[in-house]
Structure formats: structure tokens, C-alpha cells
Amino acid sequence: MSVKIRLARRGRKKMAIYDVVVADARAPRDGRFIEKIGTYNPNTNPASININNERALQWLLNGAQPTDTVKAMLSYRGVMLKKHLQIGVVKGAITQEQADAKFEAWVAEKEAKIQSKVDSIGKAKEEARQKALEAEAAKNQARLDAIKAREEEAKAAAAAAEAPAEEAAEDAAPEASAEGEEATEA
């Protein structure tokens, strides 16, 4: 019986979440499995990979074959490196202490890389949010300026409309007084 470590799909349409399972190679993708050893969520940034490293290593050492995707995930989590180091210990190339030290150094470096990626993504999101807020504030200020300009134009138009009426009244008043003066002179 050939045993595979592979993904089993679950979740709703277009929002898939996968279980990392150990299953018989002849079983259907989402069918019967021997053991569930983790989950994989590609919908987050960076993708969330939660795998029981000890059980995955045990299955690998017992001969289970990972699919390409699961192999990449196990490599990302350090399980493949740990398997490589463990084989070196079994063959006598290195001691268990040396293997553990190498693995711990690798884990520390990997965690630093992951944290820097998460921080850069968070920083990029914050910068995008700040840009959007600044653009919105600029747009609101432009609207306020346009409203003020329209109000000033309306006031100027009203003042201009009142000024000719006053001038017409003033022009009419001197003419009437001039006619009155002519009438008194005559």
C-alpha cells in the first residue's frame, strides 16, 4: 500500500482551505484518509501553514511520499531539512546535537524572514491607507473650495445686480429733480 501526504480540499466556493492528510494513494482526493496532520489556508497573506512537524517527520521517515505542493510546504516549515539531518545522524555523518543546532539556527533565520515579510505587508497596507486618507482629504478640500467660489460668485452677482438698480434709481432721481427745476424756472 502506497501512502501519500497530500491536500484534501474543504471550505466554500472560491475560498478553499485545505487539510494536510496522510492517505492511501488509491483513495479519492477528499475521501478517506489515515491521519490529518495539518491545515493550509492560501487565502491569507502570507499563506497560513499549520502542520504537526513531528507527525509529518514520522510519516516521512516511515516512507510516505509527499505531493509536490505538500513537499514545498514541508520544506517551508523545515520538516524536509529535519528529515535530511536525521538521516545524517542515522548514517553517523553528524551527531544529534549538531543536527539540532543546525535546525535551530535555520528556524531562527526562517522566523526572522517570515516576520519581516509580515511587517512589510503591514507597512504597505498602512501606507496605502494613509495615501487614501490624504487623497480623500484633498478631494474634500477641493469640494469646499469649489463651494466657496460658487458662493462668492453668487454674492458678487447679487451685488452687481443691486448696483445697476441703485445706479438706475440715482440716475432717475437727478433727472426728476432736473425736470422739477425746469418747471420751477418756467
Image (cartoon, grey):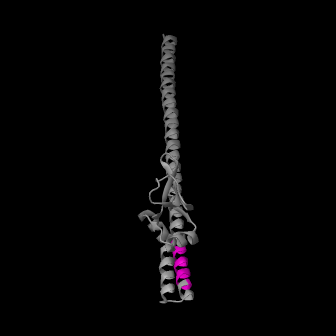
Q: How many marks?
A: 0
Q: Nearer the viewer, residue 167 or 21?
A: 21
Q: Position of residue 164 (x, y in %)?
A: 47, 26
Q: Nearer the viewer, residue 119 or 139?
A: 119
Q: Residue at x 54, y 88 (%)?
A: 98
Q: Position of residue 92 (x, y in %)?
A: 49, 89
> In the rendered structure, which segment of residues is drawn in magenta?
100-113
Q: Residue at x 52, y 25 (%)?
A: 166
Depicted 55 relative to depicted 158: above or below: below
Q: Is residue 10 magenta?
A: no
Residue 12 appearing in the image: yes
Q: Nearer the viewer, residue 118 or 175?
A: 118
Q: Residue at x 50, y 89 (%)?
A: 94
Q: Is residue 105 magenta?
A: yes
Depicted 184 relative to depicted 160: above or below: above
Q: Residue at x 50, y 67 (%)?
A: 117
Q: Position of residue 182 (x, y in %)?
A: 48, 14
Q: Position of residue 84 (x, y in %)?
A: 47, 79
Depicted 181 relative to depicted 167: above or below: above
Residue 42 appearing in the image: no
Magenta stretch, main secondary structure, is: helix
